[in-house]
Image (cartoon, rainbow, N blue to C red):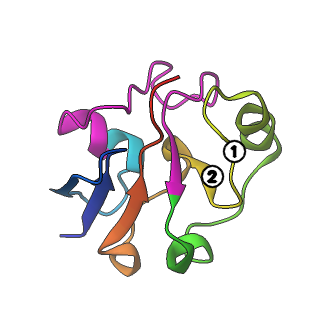
Amino acid sequence: MPQVVYVDPSGFRRSVDADAGDTVMTAAVRNGVPGIVGECGGHISCATCHVWLRPEYVDLSGEIGDMEEDLLDLGVAERRQTSRLGCQVVITDELDGLTVDVPPPA
């Protein structure tokens, strides 16, 4: 079972178990990770699941689609080169240990 590590703005690390096929957002919401709301339920329409991937996971996380690009540009948190919407990052066994930073609230 893959694990995902969410790091909050204070540096607190929360490790959660995820199922392969979950998204970073669904695993966070299911486990009550603060700062990841997933308001739209993963339909690429709200950006309340914005995270910053650690650089070593960027190439493993898949391509960013046009809708995700648009929402990241309009998001309330700082956009970084490693920004992703958690609803668009599908967890695989290869991503076991995936570490993401949760941006501070706006």
Q: Secondary structure at mark 1?
A: loop
Residue 66, labelled with which disc?
A: none
> How many labels, in total?
2
Residue 36 magenta-drawn? yes
Q: Which residues are magenta?
A: 27-52
Circle number at residue 79: 1
69 vs 77, nearest the viewer: 77
Which residue position is annotated with label 2? Answer: 83
Magenta stretch secondary structure, dominant: loop
Q: What quarter of the picture does the N terminus occupy?
A: bottom left
Across and down, in percent, residue 101 comes to: 42, 53
SS for tag 2?
strand
Q: Quadrant of residue 76?
A: top right
Q: Residue at x 63, y 52 (%)?
A: 83
Report x, y in % for residue 78.
Answer: 65, 40
Q: Residue at x 24, y 59 (%)?
A: 19
Q: Is residue 14 left or right of residue 66?
A: left
For residue 2: magenta? no
Residue drawn at the location 34% of the way across and 40% of the way down: 26
